[in-house]
Image (tube, rainbow, N blue to C red):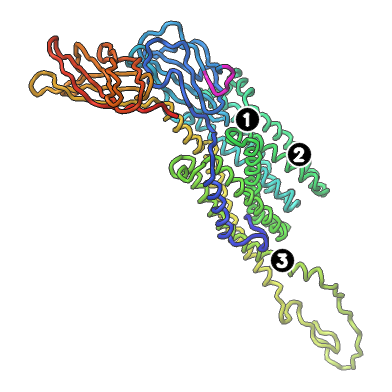
Amino acid sequence: MHTGPARSVGTPLTALALVVAVFALVLGGAGAAFAHAGLSGSDPADGAVLKAAPQYVTLTFTESVSFSEDSLRVLSPQNERVNPRPARHVDGKDNTARVELSGKLPQGTYTVAWRVVSADGHPISGAFVFSNGKPSETAAVVATGSPDDTAVGRLYGVLRYVAYSGLALLVGAAAFVLVCWPEAATVRPVRRLLVLGWVALTASTVALLLLRGPYETAGQLTSAFDPAQLGRTLTGRPGGALVARLVLLAAAAVSLRWVARRTADRTGLGGRLRWAGALFASALAVTWAAAEHASAGIQVALAVPVAVLHLLAMGVWLGGLITLLLLLRRRGSDGREIPASAIGRFSALAFNAVAVLVATGVYQSWRQVGSWEALSTTSYGKTLLVKIAAVVLVLCAASFSRRWTARLGHEASPATATAALMPAVSAPERVRVAQGVGAPTPAAGQEPGGAAEAPAGDGPGDTAEAPRFEADAYRRGLRRTVTAEAVLGVVVLVVTTVLTGTQPSRAAGERVAVASAAEPQAQVVTVPFDMGTANHQGTVQITLTPGRVGENTVEAVVYTPDGGLATVPELRLSLTQDALGIGPLDAKLKNLKGYWAAYDLRLPMPGVWTLNITVRTTDIDQVTVRDTVRITSLPG
């Protein structure tokens, strides 16, 4: 229920319009950013056909990565591993990974399978192939699904939800007690909520620490207790953040017991304790920000504190809402209820929390999305749209909560003021009055010689029950709207957790762009020719890779009329550029038993080149056909 006094905020539509305006301004001027690493290049390149076996396989990523012993595997056509040693960084560059291959590799197609951990703590994986001498069939099979689509990955995702929920309950309930109503610390449901938040966060953190190793390496669930794997986890940044979180939670357990004794002794909660609670909550939030999206990409020095504020605001708002809901539904044996003044204080606190959520959320959206197009074309953008829709519904529910809070506060204020200003009225003094002999006995409740006393509360204008009835109605209305707001807040929390595990739109776009630039482009020309017999026309397919100025690979395949491979005794190819008088350049194709190829054809100039293809179909029959291909200049 993030609403404050009427003078501090306008209508929800006005606030929403401001959010949209800022969002448009920021997204419109976005620059480049990274989060989640992407493969930017490899040596050998994907699909390359090499004349000689390489000594190393090297991968280059868009940001720093870490890896384990099995992070990079090179598999032979028989599915045998040919890199005997684990990967290493190249020349100290933390965005590279290199493995050394065995001494002599037979000809065929090799598969490179990799799985590394990006700087923001999320594993990424992929695979590609290259051929030594000539392509071949391969028995190597690698996983092509999402790195999180494993039993360990799914369990790890569930535990992340539990951790975020525990943080919200612990921070929100503590903030409500320290800022809004210190006496709530003596209420059993609130104390249980604090314990529940601590237990959920502690248990999920321990489980995440154990599962971190198999999550990064796609290992089995049973390997969670492997000491060697746990040791590697503790030396990494995500593992270090989880250990720091456990230390903070241990300190929190001691602090909560001390606070419980202070409140039991009615010694009160001072300002120093509030500051200590704020520092503790900030330190907890840092254990997330230092190991996730905020820790990688541009503006890390700004992104980390922004992420901390975002998490704290989420906890104060959502956990405080749940605490308020428990107190509104409670009616203790002593009849005490949460005072309207405490509800008003939380209203102002929650309003400030949502303002921080909006401001930090706009910055994070700019940093991770980057363009309007990415909102509808990437998984991160689509998930972010769902979160925005949920936040809009939360603002609508909050507007109704604000109305009930204002009515409840207005109802409580006059009654409180009247009680404070009303002077103490002493009981009427009985006066003896002379009574004549034989006079009638005074009626019950009537003084001798006086009028009968009116029963208390029967006088005109008495409205003692009306304010109480209206206050109860206001509390019921507030309870309904707070319930709706809390449910929507849980939806926002779930979507936020999904976002933290989704590749940001900027990284996805950058990865696609880098991959497109890294993949060699090819020019393919298919030319029909007469095979020398009646109604038999074959085709010859010429592929030039990358089809640019400089060195090119040429592959030629001859097909029969029915689409099968044809074997010809000779195939020659030459290229000329008539406009500049260049050529003919002989490609010097070699017969590689099934197709013809050359790997060192150099084309000096861009433009339209003429292909002169001579196919000898028998010892005495041959045909020459022509076609054209456009050769482009080097990129950049």
| Residue 245, placed above or below residue 134 | below
Local secondary structure at mark 3: helix
Q: Quarter holding the N terminus?
A: bottom right
Q: Rate crowding at label 1 as few (under 14), some (14 to 19) or many (20 or more) other CA atoms within 10 Å.
A: some
Q: Which mark is residue 412?
A: 3
Where's residue 498, x and y in %? Answer: 52, 39
Q: Are marks 3 and 1 in contact (CB under 8 Å)?
A: no
Q: Which mark is residue 297?
A: none
> Could you say which quadrant of the image residue 546 lies in?
top left
Q: Which residues are magenta?
A: 91-97
- C-alpha span from label 3 to label 1: 47 Å
Amino acid type of the residue tagged 2 in the rendering: Ser
> Could you say which quadrant of the image residue 130 lies in?
top left
User: Which circle's residue, 3 or 1, is located before the other in the chain?
Assistant: 1
Q: Rate crowding at label 2 as few (under 14), some (14 to 19) or many (20 or more) other CA atoms within 10 Å.
A: some
Q: Which mark is residue 255?
A: 2
Where's residue 68, x and y in %? Answer: 55, 19
- C-alpha span from label 2 to label 1: 20 Å
Local secondary structure at mark 1: helix
User: Which circle's residue, 2 or 3, is located before the other in the chain?
Assistant: 2
Seen from the viewer's position, the closer of residues 554 and 503 is 554
- C-alpha span from label 2 to label 3: 35 Å
| Residue 613, placed above or below residue 356 | above
Where's residue 29, x and y in %? Answer: 54, 45
Majority secondary structure in the magenta region: strand
User: Which circle's residue, 2 or 1, is located before the other in the chain?
Assistant: 1
Seen from the viewer's position, the closer of residues 443 and 546 is 546
Name the residue: 55% across, 17% down: 90
Q: Which mark is residue 206?
A: 1
Magenta segment includes 386 = no
Magenta segment includes 96 = yes
